[in-house]
Amino acid sequence: MTDPILIADSIDVRFGDFQALSGFSLSVQPGTIHALIGPNGAGKTTLFNALTGARKPSGGRIVFDGHAVTRTSVHRRVHYGMSRSFQVTALFAALTVAENLRLAVQARYASEGWIFWRSPHRRHDIRDEVDALLAETFLTDRADTRTGDLSHGGQRSLEIGMALAGRPKLIFLDEPLAGMGIDDVHRTKGLIDSLRSRMAVLLIEHNMSVVLDISDRITVMAAGRKIAEDIPAKIRTDPAVRTAYLGSTA
Amino acid sequence: MSAQLLLFQVLNGVGIGMIYFLLSVGLTLIFGLMRFVNFAHGAFYLVAAYIAYAVVIWTGSFWWALLLGPAIVAVLALVIERLLLRHTYSLPHEAQILITFAVALFLQEMVILIFTPLGHNVPVPPALSGVLFLGPYVYPAYRLAVVGVAALVAIMLWIAIERTKMGSILRAGSESAEMVGLLGINVDRVFMATFALGAALAGLAGVLVAPLRGVEPFMSAEALGIAFVVVVVGGLGTLSGALVGGILIGLVQSIMSTLWPEGAQLMIYASMALVILIRPTGLLGRI
Amino acid sequence: MHATERFPNLATAIVLAALVVLPFTVPATLASQIAIFATGALSVVLLLGAVGLLSFGQGLYLGVGAYVCGILVRDAGIGLIPALLVASLSGAVLAGLLGSVIVRRHGVYFVMLTLAFAQMGYFVVLAFKSVTGGENGLSGLPRQFDILGLSIADPLSMYGFMAGAFFLVFLLVQRVIASPFGSVLAAIRENEPRSEALGYPVARYKTAAVALAGGIAGLAGGLHVIFLGFVPPSDIELEMSQRLLVIALIGGIGSPGGALIGSAFYTIVSEALSEIWPRWMALIALLLIGLVLFLPGGLWSAGRRISALFERKIAHD
C-alpha cells in the first residue's frame, strides 16, 4: 500500500459558535478517485476550504505529499501540487476562456508572472498547453468567448480546466457536474474518469450514478462528521448512509 | 515627568479621547451597518462646527447651536443619502468612497464660500466659562462638560444599540443586511436612519469642539484622518472600539504633547501603524 | 485595463500628439505642470485601473520624492538624473514597505489606511523641521539646471524634459500592463480568491504594484522640485493625494492616457477658473459625482472597460 497523497487528521472548523467540522479524518490514495458525498450543509465545501487553505482549521493536521500544510497559504499549497475548482463558478468573467486558461497555466511557471517588459504571448509552450486544455475540456471552439457569456455548462467545464492547468497531484473538484446538460455530464464524467492516470481526485458531487460509477472510494459526511467510508458497492447498501440522506424514519 | 503632571496629562488625554470617540463613533456605526466608510464624515463635522459659529454669532446662544448643528447636518445627510448614495449601493465600494469624498470637497468649498477661508473663534458659552481646580491645576469647566456630554452619549448609544428594538435591527443588519430585509424590515429606512444618526454624531462633535479649537475650513480633513486612526486602532464596526480607540489616541496625543510637541500628531499615526502591525483588525475589532 | 489594451499604438500616438501640441496651446510653464501631474496621476491609474486598488495616498510618495530630490540637489550636489532616480527609488521603497503591511487589508480598510498614511507623511515633515524646513518647505536649491550638458532653464526646454519624462513613464506603464506581470494584476483585480487559488502569491504582487506606483509618484515629486526650484510642503499634504486621484478619475482610469487628459483638464480649468471663481473646486466635486454615477470611465471614454469592472464586482458581491 503506497503512502496516501493527502492525510487529514481530526480536522475541526468552527464559525463562531457553529461547529462546521468535527474531528474529521480522511486519507486519499494517489491515482484514485475519492468521492465526498452527503446532504446539503454537511460541510463538504468547508472541508475543501480547510484542505486547500482557504480557511484555517481550528484543530487538526493536514499532510500533503509529505508536507505539513495545516497553516500553509493557499498559493503555496498550489505549488505543492493541490488544485481546485469552485462550487460557485469563480472565473475571470471579463476575460476570454483562453486568457483564463493562460493565467492558470502561467501560474505554474512561477517566474513568468514577474516578467514586466514583454508580451505574455511570446511563450509558445504556455500557448500549447492552453490549446491542449481547451481540447480536453471541449472548449476549443469557444476559446475567444468572454467567460461571462459562456453557458453554465461551459463555465463548469472551464472551472475544471483551470484546476487541471496546475498539473496537480491532487485535484479538488467541487460539484463539477452541477447544472450541466446530459451531453456535458457524459463528456465530463469521461474526463474525470481519465484523470486517475495522472493524479488523485477528491470529488464532491451530488450526481449519485456518476459517483457510484467512477469512484474508487466514497466518504459520506453529515453535520460535519464522517458517517461512512468504503467502496461504492458497500456504500450503496449502508443503512447509516440512507438515514443521513433520507432521515431517521427511512 | 512628575506623577502629578502625568496624572494631569492622563486626564487631559481622556478628555481629548472622549471627543475623538464622539467624532469616530458615527463613522464606525455607519460602517457596521452599511459596510461603507463615509468619506464625508469630516465634512459633517465641519458643517456643524460652522453652523455653531454662525448661530452663536447671530443669536448669542450656544444651546441653539447645540440643537441646530447636529439637526441640520442630519437633514443634510438624509438628502445626500436619498439623492446620491442610494444609487451606489449596487456599485463597488470604491464608488461610495468617491462620491462621499466628492461631497466632502463640495461641502468644504461651500463653507469657504459662505464664511471665507479664514478661521474663526467661537466663544465658550458663558455658563461654562469658569474653571475647576484639580490640585494645583486648573481645568476649564467647558472641557469637563464636553467629556460629560460624550460619556452621556456613549451610554445612550449603548442602551439604544443593546437594549432597543431599533438597536437589535442595527446589530442584525451588521451581520446581514439581506437577512434583515427578508425579515420584512425596510432596510432602506434603517440605512437612512443610521446614516443620519452617524452624521448627527459627527455634527455634535463639531459643535462641541468649536469653542475649544475654533473653526477653520480644513478641519474636515484633519478630523477624517483622526477618525480613521481611531477606528483602525479600536476596531471597525463597534461602539466599544470607537471608545477604546478614541481614549487611547487621546492619551497618546496628550502625553506626547509634553514629551515631544512637534511630533504629537505624528505619534498618533505612528500608534496606528503599530496597531496594524501587531493586531490588524484593531484592538477590539472583529473584521 | 486588460492585459491587451485594444489599441495601445493608437493610444500612444494620441498621447504623443497631445504632448507635441500642448506647448503651442498653453504657456510652456503650464504645460510643464500638466506633464508633471500627469506623471503623478499615472501612479493612481496604475493602481486603480490595473489592480483595482484605490489609493488616497499617492501624494505621500510624491512628497517623499520631492523632499529627497530637493535635499540631494541642494546638499549633495549630485546631478539631476541621479537625484531623480534616487527620488523615485525612495518612493518605491517606502511604498513597498508600507504596502507590504496594508495590502493584506481589503476593501475600504485598505483605502482608509492609504489616507491615514498620507496624513502621517505630512506630520513627519512637520515633526522633523530641521531637515525638511517644516511649514516653510525646502529652499536654497540651485535654479539653473543642466541635463547631460543641455540646459533646461528656459520654459520650453523645461517642458521638453518634463514631457519626455512623462512619456517614458507612460510607455513603461503600457508595457507593464501588457506583460505577464500586468496580466496577473488584472487577474487579481478581476477575482482575487481565484488568483490565489491558481497559485499566485497575491499579496506579493499587490505590494510590487504599490511599490511601482510609489516609484512613479516619487519621480513626479522630483520633477516638481526641479520645475519649482524649491520643495513646497503642499507636495506632501493630503491635498496632493486628492489632486492626483481627481486627475486620474477625470481622465479615466481605463488607460494610462487618461492621466494626461485628466491632468490637462484639471490644470487648465484650475488656471482659467481660479481667477474668476476661487471656489471652482466645488464644480470639480460635482463633476466627480457625475462621473462616478454616469461615466465611470472618465474622459478617456474607457467607460465600457470600467463598467465591466463594476459588472464583475456586482456579480461577485
Image (cartoon, coloured by chain):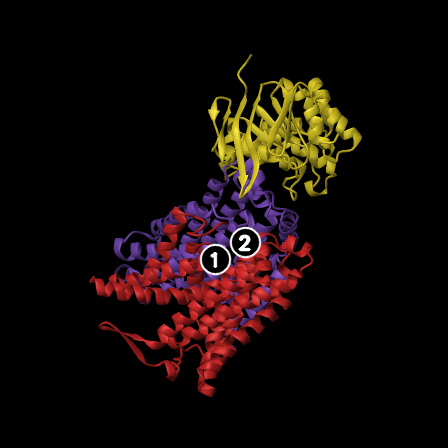
Chain colours: A yellow, B red, C purple
Which quadrant of the figure has residue A195?
top right
Q: Is residue C6 above or below residue C143?
A: above
Q: Residue at x 69, y 43 (%)?
A: A148
For mark 2, give the secondary structure.
helix
Q: Residue at x 60, y 70 (%)?
A: B78
Residue C238: x and y in percent read 43, 62
Three-letter code for the amino acid on which mark 1 is drawn: Phe
Q: Which residue is mark 2?
A: C16
Amino acid on which the number 2 mark rests in the picture: Leu
Label 1 marks a residue whose chain is C
Q: CA distance from mark 2 to mark 1?
A: 28 Å
Q: Is residue B2 left or right of residue C226?
A: left
Q: What is the residue that sits farthest to the right in this orientation?
A: A182
x, y percent for residue C213: 46, 49
Say which chain tag 2 marks.
Answer: C
Q: Position of residue C158 (x, y in %)?
A: 41, 60
Outermost residue, left side: B2
Residue that sits furthest to the front in the current view = A249
In the image, residue B178 above or below residue B213:
above
In the figure, residue B232 lies in which quadrant?
A: bottom left
> Mark number for residue C56?
1
Under tag 1, what secondary structure?
loop
Camera sees residue A230: yes
The residue closer to the viewer here, C22 or B113, is B113
